[in-house]
Every structure is written in structure tokens, then in C-alpha cells.
């Protein structure tokens, strides 16, 4: 490897480390934001995000929620279960097929959303 190639490789390595450090700063900032959300709202950032998504799409199903949040359907089901247990969302079955559940934000969930820190996402 000649001197020029070495200098370029060193520059590339330094630049990569700078970008990695900036990424770490962003991740730390996001983590702090979601800790603040949980402290102030009493729900996790993921729960608040799911609640906001359901409020924006009343009657959506768990699969639709999962796609909107870019998470696995089982993860969305767990979020909905926890939100329903806290009285923040309701699950309503429509028609004969009991597998199809529509999701709605409750009055309690709407109040929580209104008081929640911004931005949600």
C-alpha cells in the first residue's frame, strides 16, 4: 500500500469513527426522550406510539397496527393487550369471525394522548 492509499484509509477510518460517534449521540438522545415520555406519561414510548396510531386509525386491526409501527404482529398484540388492561384502548369484535378485532382509543386513552409530551415519534 502506498502512502496516498494509507492516508486515504486513515481518513476513511477517522470519518467512520466520527459518524459512529454521531450515531451514538442520536441513540442516547432518543433513549433520554423515551425515558422522559415514560416518566411524564406513565406509559412507554412504544405504548404511546401505538396509542397515537390507533387514535389516527380508529377501528384498525392488530395487523394494520403492526405494519404501521413496523413491528411484528405478536409485538403489536402485546402492546394492545397492555393498553387494554390499562383501559386506554378497547377491542371490539365485529361480525361472525371472532378473529377480527377492531381497536379504538378510550376516553382515558384520549386524555393521556392529549397530555403526552411531543413529538410522539
Image (cartoon, rainbow, N blue to C red):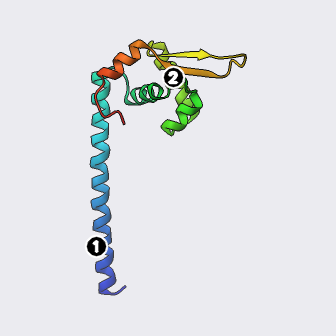
Residue pictured at 58% horizontal, 27% vertical: 61
Image quarter in which the N terminus is found: bottom left
Which mark lies nearer to you, 1 or 2? Answer: 2
- Tell me where residue 41 sits by quadrant: top left
- 46 lies left or right of 63: left
- Residue 109 on image: x %, y %: 40, 17
Say which of 4 and 19 sits in front. 19
Kindly identify the residue that appears in the image at 32 percent across and 68 percent down. 13
Identify the mark nearer the N-term, 1 or 2: 1
Give the labeled residue for mark 2. Answer: 80
Question: For numbered disc 2, what is the local secondary structure?
Answer: helix
Q: Quadrant of the C terminus?
A: top left
Does residue 82 appear left or right of residue 38 in this picture? right
**Residue identified by numbered label 1:** 11
Count up the numbered dots: 2
The residue at the far bottom in this view is 2
- For the point 48% across and 36% down, the residue is 69
Can you tell which quarter of the image residue 113 is in? top left
Vertical order, 47 against 13 (above or below): above
| Nearest to the observer: residue 5 or residue 43 | 43
Q: Using the image, tell me which numbered label, if any, was put on residue 38.
A: none
Q: Is residue 107 above or below residue 13?
A: above
Amino acid at each position: 500500500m502506498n502512502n496516498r492509499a494509507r492516508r486515504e484509509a486513515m481518513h476513511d477510518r477517522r470519518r467512520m469513527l466520527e459518524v459512529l460517534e454521531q450515531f451514538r449521540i442520536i441513540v442516547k438522545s432518543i433513549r433520554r426522550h423515551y425515558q422522559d415520555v415514560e416518566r411524564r406519561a406513565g406509559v412507554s414510548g412504544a405504548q404511546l406510539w401505538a396509542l397515537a396510531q390507533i387514535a389516527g386509525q380508529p377501528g384498525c386491526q392488530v395487523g394494520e397496527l403492526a405494519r404501521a409501527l413496523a413491528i411484528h404482529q405478536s409485538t403489536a398484540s402485546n402492546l394492545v393487550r397492555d393498553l387494554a388492561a390499562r383501559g386506554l384502548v378497547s377491542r371490539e369484535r365485529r361480525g361472525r369471525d371472532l378473529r377480527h378485532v377492531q381497536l379504538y382509543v378510550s376516553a382515558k386513552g384520549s386524555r393521556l394522548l392529549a397530555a403526552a409530551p411531543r413529538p410522539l415519534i
